[in-house]
Amino acid sequence: MNSFYLSKPYDPPQAPQNLPLDCPWALLGGISPEKFMKSYWHKKPLLVRGAIPAFELAKRLGEPLGSAISPEELFNIAGDDVVESRLIQAKPWTFSNGPFKKKSIPPLDSPDWTLLLQGMEARHPAAAKILSWFRFIPDARLDDLMISIAGPGGGVGPHFDSYDVFLIQMSGRRRWRISVQKDLSLNPKLPLKILQNFKMEQEWDLEPGDMLYLPPHVAHDGIALDGGCQTWSVGFRAQSYKEILQEGLWRLAESLEDIPVLEQRFADPRQRATRFPEQLPEEIIAQVSTKLRELKLDRIETFLPGITAYLSEPKPQAYFDGPANPLSPKEFQLQISKQSLVPHPQTRLLALGKRIYCNGEDVTSGQDQQT
């Protein structure tokens, strides 16, 4: 019988509010979040043995912990068509997208397969709790928690990510090989983004409770050593400047619809006769420049609301079911005066000064809030 069925599942705690950022955290190997961000974030890898001390403590007591989510639960979630899932096979490399019926997923002890499940914080409270531990990093940067479950030898091949990632070993063992090599060219003959010339520089076997942090563009290859190996990956967003600016400008353009003064027609009573009719008139340039200054469209503060709204948008797979019996506005106000308001797991909330953005919308109460 597999050890999953013999072990008590780990029950992760919700991260407490207002933890000190200048004190050592076990999660980060005894360094503070401030030191981690200064010395490691976006700079160099960090291996943390016993990042989740409960695993080692339970092992010493002879009561080893299992994953917070069982393989059966993961296989059931993989069958949901709103969950982003992938099944990867090695030797040869192949992959397919979900949803998956349970019978299409190999047995735990079958070699060389990996099942990947994205956005697990929205599917299971244990994943949401794990994610809460990383809120010393701005929410605007956080993407999601992905779970990988694999058979012996399973993995996705040597690759690199364009974003920061924390790799938490939750069940079984995984061997990580990493390299800070400059050559990140991909093998064009494979269906996956696998490095063509991976040259391992460091190697570790991670046990349950261990964690490996990798900054962007560090080449890495994780190979499951046991059947049912689970690795939980906390990933971060790294949009291109092009994407951020396009989204911010698009939302800014939409907001111009609500400015009556812009309905006025352009007029140029001071336009002089010209010998160069093909040139854009200086009068148009001058008047548009004036409008930009008047509306503060030449200042970054004008773009920030649109950028914040964009960064607060939920993932494309997010799905929200309304309550069967919604409260009236008065009842809602009464309820939140008595208890805390807990956002839906797929909801994204961001703040810009005193303004609040939820799922891509400005939901600030009142119209006179200042950024």
Image: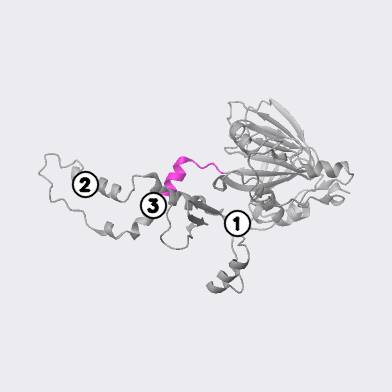
Q: Earlier in the sequence, mark 1 or mark 3?
A: 3
**Residue 23, percent across and down?**
67, 39
As for residue 241 lying within the magenta part, the answer is yes
Front residue of 78 and 123: 123
**Residue 335, percent across and down?**
60, 69
Q: Secondary structure at mark 1?
A: loop
Q: Earlier in the sequence, mark 2 or mark 1?
A: 2
Does the rendering let one see residue 169? yes
Task: Compute the Cα span from label 2 to label 1.
Answer: 46 Å
Q: Secondary structure at mark 3?
A: helix
Marks 2,1: beta carbons within 8 A: no
- Residue 99 is left or right of residue 312, and the answer is right
**Residue 158, percent across and down?**
66, 33
As for residue 239 lying within the magenta part, the answer is yes
> Picture quarter containing residue 161?
top right
> Picture quarter containing residue 201?
top right
- Residue at 72 percent of width and 53 percent of height: 126
Does the rendering let one see residue 100? no
Callout 1 amino acid: Gln
Marks 2,3: beta carbons within 8 A: no
The circle drawn on residue 284 is 2
**Residue range of the region highlighted in magenta in the rendering:** 237-250
Callout 3 amino acid: Leu
* Residue under label 1: 346
Q: Earlier in the sequence, mark 2 or mark 3?
A: 3
* Residue under label 3: 252
Task: Compute the Cα span from label 2 to label 3.
Answer: 21 Å
- Residue at 41 percent of width and 53 percent of height: 251
